[in-house]
Image: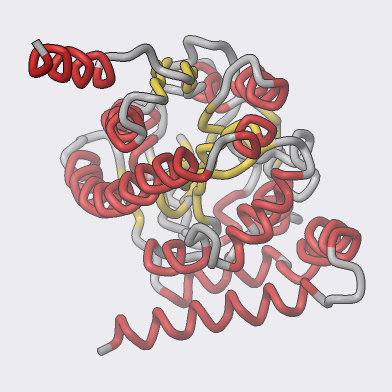
Amino acid sequence: MLVVFFILAEAGAVFAAPEHRWKFGVPWPRPTQNEYFRMFCDRVKEYSNGRIEIRFYPDGQLGTHDEHFHAVQEGSVQMVMVVPYVNLVPGGMVNWVPWTIENVDEAKIAFKAGEGILWKVMEDAYNEVGIHMLFQTSFGAYGIGNKERALKAPEDLKNLKMRVSASLGMVRALEGMGKGYGMTMQTIPWGDVYDALSKGVVDGCWSLWPSLVEDRQAEVLKHFSDVNFAWDTNNVVINKELWDQLPQDLKDAVSKAASEVEEMLYDRQEALEAEFKKTLSAMPDFQITLLTPEQREAFRERSNTAAIWDELVKPWLEKRYPGEDMTGKLQKELKKIHEEVLAKRKK
């Protein structure tokens, strides 16, 4: 009888009701990444010994991007994947300063949880609005697509109507590239890009290799150039008050799952990029333009990144870190990361 009692007691512990039931929402279709988000949920349950159970809601089931953001901010949804548009996160501009992160190796260093310079600054930015970062998910470097012509130089942006978002640093960079060429810009939500392109509301947009395929943007674009002027980083975040109240062992369980899945996502992103390029190259009505370093530099020069730092990044950094010259420190560290990665890749 004692043996039976202990067996039943152990089974009861395994199948006990979880202490925490969370929702995890993703506002946009992300078929490839969803596999890993589900894996994250499973690993959190495993590492917490069933004390945390996360139900995954993909493909905008919980609403728009901003609705996801406000839901996690207020705590009605515990965890979401979002991007820190500056209208939501005042310090969010740091997440995508144009012409800084250029490849996955740099991203891994700069956004490394608890250590990377961009992780530290973005954690502070999110904390200001009641949110804690868990891990990053990237779609790579941003190029520019359009329906009219191959983009090989800034003047090829002449008279194009370009879709932009609330990512002001990228807006300013694109604005600089097309300045004086009659290019116009229109703010359109990411989820509406396909319709806007197909209906002629806009002629083009910045995009990424996965989005061209998974969001089917290549169907309504004819040209894409790998300008690589910004790096896509989405943030998987959790309500900060909830996070702060968790015991350390549960924080460790969530952080362990987050670290493992983040690394797998980086590896998968690199492999998928090659697959997406192959798929796009096989499309008869879609043209890829691979820029030379000199051609890309022409776009960089017109982006006027110094002005972007001064206008959009420096004010928040000085307010958040008074007297620390965080702008200078951030630029110096990002340059160091770039040079170190470049040197390793040349070996």
Q: Residue at x 47, y 84 (%)?
A: 339
Across and down, in percent, residue 101 comes to 52, 65
Q: Position of residue 299 (x, y in %)?
A: 58, 65
Q: How is the image coloured?
A: secondary structure
The structure residue drawn at horizontal position 46% and vertical position 60%, both measured from the top left corner, is 152
Quadrant for the C terminus in the image: bottom left
* Nearest the eye: 4 or 41: 4
Q: Please indicate, yes or no, whether residue 139 appears anywhere in the rendered image.
A: no
> Is 283 located above or below residue 168 in the figure?
above
Q: Quadrant where the N terminus lies?
A: top left
Give the answer, above or below, for where 119 lies relative to 276: below
Residue at x 37%, y 88% (from the top left corner): 343
Count the labels in the image: 0
- 250 relative to 333 in the view: left or right: left
- Which is nearer the eye, 70 or 221? 70
Q: Is residue 87 left or right of residue 19?
A: right
Task: Give x and y (percent) for residue 150.
Answer: 42, 50
Question: Would you say residue 233 is visible in this rendering?
Answer: yes
Q: Residue at x 46, y 51 (%)?
A: 143
Above/below status of 81 relative to 337 = above
Locate residue 103: give its quadrant. Answer: bottom left
Residue 346 location, x and y as percent? Answer: 29, 87
Question: Which one is nearer the viewer's eye here, 64 or 295?
Answer: 64
Q: Is residue 139 above or below residue 40?
A: below
